[in-house]
Image: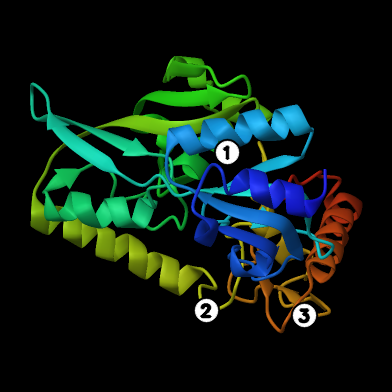
Amino acid sequence: MTNIEILENLKLYMPKERIKQNEPMKLHTSFKVGGPADFFVTVESIEELKNIIKFTKKSKIPLYIVGNGTNLLVKDNGISGIVVKLAMNKFEVSERENSKIEVKAQAGVPLAFLGQKMLQSEIAGLEELSGIPGTIGGAIIMNAGAHGKEMKDIVKNVVAIDYDCNICEFTNEQCKFEYRNSMFENGKYIILQANLELEKGNKDEISRKMSEYMQFRKEKQPLEYPSAGSTFKRGTDFVTAKLIDDAGLKGYSIGGAQVSEKHAGFIINKNNATAQDILNLIKYVQETILKKFNKNIELEVKII
């Protein structure tokens, strides 16, 4: 199928202003790198998503789902096929017994945005996670966490769709949450919504915690440079950032990519890096740690 035919089909499912061709992915990732996607579409409803799933499956066109692109590294040659950005970003709050609050949040809701809304409504439980620069959907897929709390601690259940367009619901237990992992990592489902269990809180206390955690991030993490957050997972019996630091790799650069001097667990786009610069640096760090300490370090960042 030609790109013209693909475009004409996509226009049947959504307004043409939400369809972009040859769209640079560096505009849609926090690393600020990545070549063009053949098609980049912004989806605002389940019906639109279903139509695109059916179309790509029937036409055998590769389909990629992204949120805010904060944990993503797209290669320089770009993405062949259709990239769907989930922009379903509504949420609703309902009170339960014993001061419990249920928040139904669609996959495209940014955690930081939801955190601010919960603060305004005096709802506690999201403070530790509200500084994570991603969406609800992305945070659930990787069981994102910070300051001793993970998504698994607040998720009640998750609603998702499979590639046959069946809507499925999963309990917290069925999500199989582990450290920076869940059943959704297998790519068989697209998360649509999560039901979070929070609780009534004190606005001043919530605000104090959020400010404290944000200050910690500013002091300890290289937020002034493009990155995808923590590049590597923590080991079962070691702290990866400490090994990288002990190996003398803080500040080590390849091209425009650098191991952050502020936090060795972060690879940053220091000076107009290419995706290949970052990939080369990742490989060098992994090989160095294996050679020096006999430890395999795994990526937390997803590569397309």
Residue beneath disc 1? 180
Q: Are marks 1 and 2 in contact (CB under 8 Å)?
A: no
- Residue 188 image-quadrant placement: top right
Element under disc 1: loop
Residue visible at 52% across and 25% down in the picture: 161
Q: Residue at x 65, y 43 (%)?
A: 9
Above or below residue 134? Residue 136 is above
Work out whether 191 lies above or below 206: above
Q: Nearer the viewer, residue 41 or 272?
A: 41
Identify the residue shown where x is 66% and y is 36%: 236
Question: Which residue carries the number 2 mark?
Answer: 224
The quarter in which the N terminus is drawn is: top right
Q: Amino acid at mark 2?
A: Glu
Marks 3,2: beta carbons within 8 A: no
**Can residue 265 be seen in the rendering of this structure?**
no
Q: Name the one closer to the observer, 261 or 156.
A: 156
Quarter holding residue 265: bottom right
CA–CA distance in space, label 3 to label 2:
15 Å
Q: Nearer the viewer, residue 49 or 200?
A: 49
The picture places residue 22, in percent across and down from the top left corner, at 73, 64
Mark 1 vs 2, N-terminal side: 1
Using the image, tell me which numbered label, if any, was put on residue 256. 3
At label 1, which amino acid type do we have?
Arg
Q: Between disc 3 and disc 1, whose residue precedes?
A: 1
Secondary structure at numbered mark 2? loop
> Could you tell me residue 167's position as x and y percent?
48, 19
Q: Secondary structure at mark 3?
A: loop
